[in-house]
Amino acid sequence: MSFREFRAGLARVLDQVRRSPGDVVFVGAHRRAEAVLGSVEQYEAMLEAAERQHSVAAALASVRAEGLEPSQADLALFVEVAAGELTTDELRDRVLPRYRK
């Protein structure tokens, strides 16, 4: 959508984004997208996903800095955390019993 079309139909575009939270609208000039308009829910979900991925990367870096390497099973759990399929509490509850005696 061009900037001109966007400005002229702003109310319609906002309504579209509100009614279809999974949809985004690309806006730009000369057939080149320069901005993306999406719902607040989408934006917050992207921020949460980025935060989870950063946290997982930092945790793995910390473990590796100590000279350790997580098992394949542990790495799979970290992938689930990064994807938002598993909480950090659930990860801890699954991993710690393996190391407690």
Image: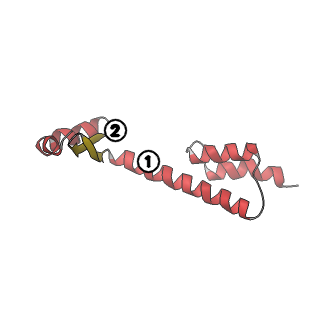
Quarter of the picture holding the N terminus: top left
Residue at position x 20%, y 42% from top? 30
Residue 29, percent across and down? 20, 45
User: Which residue corresponds to mark 1?
Assistant: 45
Label 1 is placed on what type of residue?
Ala
Compared across the picture, whether 23 is left or right of 1 comes to right
Closer to the camera, 80 or 34? 34
Label 2 is placed on what type of residue?
Pro
Compared across the picture, whether 55 is left or right of 23 comes to right
Residue at position x 30%, y 46% from top? 36
Which numbered disc flags the more N-terminal residue, 1 or 2?
2
Residue at position x 32%, y 45% from top? 39
Tell me if residue 27 comes above or below residue 54 in the rendering.
Answer: above
Residue 56, percent across and down? 61, 54
Q: Which mark is residue 70?
A: none
Q: Residues within 10 Å of mark 1 (few under 14, many from 20)?
A: few
Tell me if residue 55 comes above or below residue 35 in the rendering.
Answer: below
Q: Which mark is residue 21?
A: 2
Residue at position x 41%, y 51% from top? 44
Label 1 secondary element: helix
Label 2 secondary element: loop
Residue 31, percent across and down? 23, 39
Closer to the camera, 98 or 34? 34
Q: Residues within 10 Å of mark 2 (few under 14, many from 20)?
A: few
Compared across the picture, whether 44 is left or right of 80 comes to left
Residue 38, percent across and down? 31, 44
- Extreme residue toward the right, this view: 101
Tell me if residue 69 comes above or below residue 2 in the rendering.
Answer: below
Quarter of the picture holding the C terminus: bottom right
Is disc 1 in contact with disc 2, using a CB cutoff of under 8 Å? no
